[in-house]
Amino acid sequence: MRISIINGPNLNLLGKRETDVYGTVTFEAFLETLRTKYADTEISYFQSNVEGELINELQRAGYNSDGIVFNPAGYTHTSVAIGDAIAAIKAPVVEVHISNVQAREDFRKISHVSAKAAGSIIGLGLKGYELAIEWLIAQ
Ligand code: DQA
């Protein structure tokens, strides 16, 4: 089983970015926990602050892995092209947001991703990534 985790812009700053909203754990540290817990699953990780790079990786992973856990971060609310990429690929995509985007500013309530994703997990912190992996493994 091969699962790809893809994180969008500014998520490279997890652990030091708006810690009241996103927590103090770095994604690299969290990834180690995930890889230990799901040792039988190959978990690849890609992060970019660049929209086109995220689309390239969605296309690559979309035909080379069994499922994608995707936090598009700010592009969630703006990128038609990312929504199109998800619709274009084969692997199921689970949209994850660390914070509860529905409880924040109005612009965060719009997602170009949700309608194209298999499902969405929002507001459950980093646990959301774990739940997404559990769901993908169960498919
Ligand atoms: C986020 C929520 C987005 O609105 C925001 O732009 C992010 C992170 C989250 O994980 O809560 O960068 O996707």
Image (cartoon, rainbow, N blue to C red):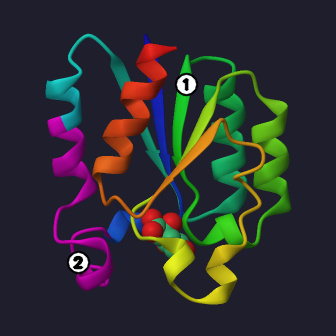
Residue 104 image point, x, y percent? 51, 85
Place of residue 10 in the rendered image (x, y in percent of width and height, measured from the top left): 45, 71
Sequence order check: which comes first, mark 2 or mark 1?
A: 2
The answer to if 20 sits in the magenta stretch is: yes
Residue 21 vertical position relative to residue 66 in the rendered view, above or below: below
Q: Quadrant of residue 13?
A: bottom left
Mark 1 lies on a secondary structure that is: strand
Which residue is label 1 attached to?
A: 67
Mark 1 Cα-neighbour bin, 10 Å: few <14, some 14–19, many ≥20? many
Helix, strand or loop at mark 2:
loop
Viewer-closest of 82 and 77? 77
Q: Is residue 46 above or below residue 136?
A: below
Q: Quadrant of residue 31?
A: top left
Residue assigned mark 2: 16
Name the spot of residue 79 as percent of width and height, x first: 78, 65
**Lateral position of residue 134 relative to residue 69, left or right:** left
- Residue drawn at the location 60% of the way across and 72% of the way down: 74
Q: Give the extent of the magenta segment.
A: 14-33
- Could you tell me which residue is drawn at 28 percent across and 49 percent down? 127
Label pair 2/1, CB-CB below 8 angstroms: no
